[in-house]
Amino acid sequence: MLTDSLGYHICRVCGDKASGFHYGVFCCEGCKGFFFRSVRANKRYQYCKRSEQCLVLRSSRNGCKFCRMQRCLEVGMSYESVKMGRCRKTDLSTRKQMLTQVADAQDELILSVYSAYMKATEQLNQSNSNDTHSVKVIEAEAVEHTLYNDYLPSIVRFVALFAREQPIFRKLSTDSQKILVKSAIIEMVLLLDAPNFDLQDNVIIHKRRGFSVKTSCAGVFGKLLADCHMFFQRLLSIGLIPVELSLLIALSIFSSDRLSGQASQDQLCMNETEDCLLMALKCQLLMNHGRHINILPSVIEVLCVIRGLTTVYYDELMSCHVAGQLS
């Protein structure tokens, strides 16, 4: 059952206010009607033009019918329920008032963050993909070039491209923008590349870029990744989908404490943005993991862990040759 802490229900498909239990799940009237018409008319929608990665939100649910239908099926809406007629409603008299509609502003925020994430990820993958699927061993003398002149600057470019797509970023002063990009580099290594890094017998392997290097040769970067191995496993075990990961990345970058001591107007904008991002992430986690009530605390714990790692390694990492690449 998809509820918030007060017991209210939201649509499992798009996040709108649920009108009841329809065809096996709590959903809104719009998604109920869409599923009913699709099944009764035996419609077969054309494949999605965006590789089946469209977000189904209240404001965008009428866009891609293929992805909306797939979402209906993923959350458990049943063909048989439509064919058999109305599902029996249980305990309606004990249910509380339904959750209010997801605000248009929140939908726009989610779509903006997700779109920026997909754009930045596509660029990162194009520039860093390993087409040969082989792993190249990086010798000690080439470690600095591979890690500090190539890999880490590519992460910085991701952060810069992702951040520039957000309206809040463009409102900040130039100094505040630089602080956000530079201070987020370690978090982005951890959040973006958790699926790609592996640690075997004190050897760091990056599967997407296709290189391996001994931790003893990688300096502070090697120590960072060695310490983060268990963190990578914990993050992967949560099972975040792309839209949730994009919001988590945005929440990490636009953390209000990054701009302590900066212009009060910038600090105010960051506080408001952080609150909105946290609410948007909570909504998505409820929609996609409604039965796993402990997932939000786990995600917040992830943010705390990566911030702690940043505190430990940031100064040392910035003192390496990579510092010149980030200015």
Image (tube, grey):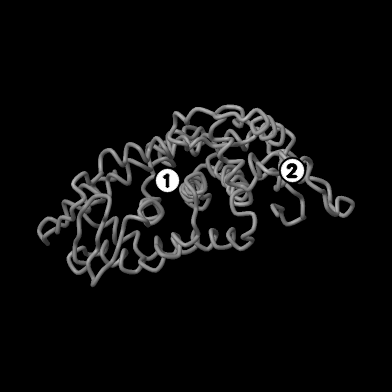
Indicate the position of residue 178 as horizontal and vertical percent values: 38, 42
Quadrant of residue 316 within the rendered picture: bottom left
Q: Is residue 97 left or right of residue 140?
A: right
Q: Quote the CA–CA distance across marks 2 and 1.
A: 45 Å
- Please report the residue visible at 47 percent of the width from the left and 30 percent of the height from the top: 47
Q: Can residue 17 be seen at all in this image of the molecule?
A: yes
**Picture layout, residue 131 above or below residue 204:** above
Mark 2 secondary-structure assignment: strand
Q: Are marks 2 and 1 in contact (CB under 8 Å)?
A: no
Mark 1 secondary-structure assignment: helix
Which amino acid type corresponds to the residue marked 1 in the rendered image?
A: Leu
- Please report the residue visible at 69 percent of the width from the left and 39 percent of the height from the top: 16
Quadrant of residue 49 within the rendered picture: top left
How many numbered discs sit on the rendered protein? 2
Q: Earlier in the sequence, mark 2 or mark 1?
A: 2
Indicate the position of residue 317 as horizontal and vertical percent values: 29, 58
Tag nearer the camera, 2 or 1: 2
- Please report the residue visible at 54 percent of the width from the left and 35 percent of the height from the top: 67
The quadrant in which the N terminus is found is: bottom right
Q: Is residue 110 left or right of residue 207?
A: right
Which residue is denoted by mark 2 in the rendering?
22
Which residue is denoted by mark 1 in the rendering?
180
Q: Is residue 307 left or right of residue 218?
A: right
* Farthest right residue in view: 93
